[in-house]
Image: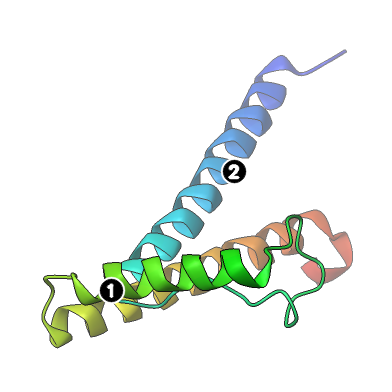
């Protein structure tokens, strides 16, 4: 017999944890961008990119990112706070993933 209550609990937990991970990751990216960190990687440094930018397009994107960073109205203290907040979001995301692995792998339960 199928325990539908347990099935619904697992489904809800999966949905909530997936939403939490996506939210933490996107908030971390947003905070890093607000802090002035440009999430742009040159094509020669990252060869596994889905879309490889031409050097001309990469230079244009870098110029746009620098212009946006220069127009940022935040003080250096607020930028530092946003940077630490972004890193904290990534750490929490990693902890959540490791906890999920701990729950899935029975050998880790002692």
Is there a contact, CB below 8 Å, between mark 1 and mark 2?
Answer: no
**Along the line of sight, which residue is nearer the eye, 59 or 108?**
59
Place of residue 64 in the rendered image (x, y in percent of width and height, measured from the top left): 38, 66
Q: In the figure, is residue 36 to the left or right of 92?
A: left
Residue at position x 88%, y 13% in the image = 1
Q: Residue furthest front?
A: 56
Q: Mark 1 against mark 2, which lies toward the viewer?
A: 1
Q: Which residue is mark 1?
A: 69
Residue at position x 58%, y 63% in the image = 57
Residue at position x 81%, y 73% in the image = 47
Give the secondary structure at mark 2: helix
Residue at position x 54%, y 64% in the image = 93
Q: Which mark is residue 28?
A: none
Give the quarter of the image for residue 104. Answer: bottom right
The colour scheme is rainbow
Q: Which mark is residue 18?
A: 2
Place of residue 74 in the rendered image (x, y in percent of width and height, measured from the top left): 13, 74
Numbered marks: total: 2
- Asked if residue 94 is positioned above or below residue 45 in the image, the reply reads above
- Asked if residue 45 is positioned above or below residue 23 in the image, the reply reads below
- Asked if residue 13 is positioned above or below residue 95 in the image, the reply reads above
Q: Name the quadrant of the C terminus.
A: bottom right
């Amino acid at each position: 017999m199928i325990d539908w209550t347990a099935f619904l609990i697992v489904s809800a937990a999966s949905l909530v944890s997936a939403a939490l991970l996506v939210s933490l990751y996107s908030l971390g990216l947003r905070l890093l961008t607000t802090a002035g960190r440009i999430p742009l990687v040159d094509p020669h440094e990252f060869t596994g990119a889905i879309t490889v930018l031409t050097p001309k397009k990469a230079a244009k994107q870098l110029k746009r990112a620098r212009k946006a960073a220069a127009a940022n109205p935040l003080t250096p203290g607020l930028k530092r706070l946003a940077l630490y907040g972004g890193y904290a979001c990534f750490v929490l995301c990693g902890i959540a993933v490791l906890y999920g692995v701990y729950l899935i792998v029975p050998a880790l339960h002692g």
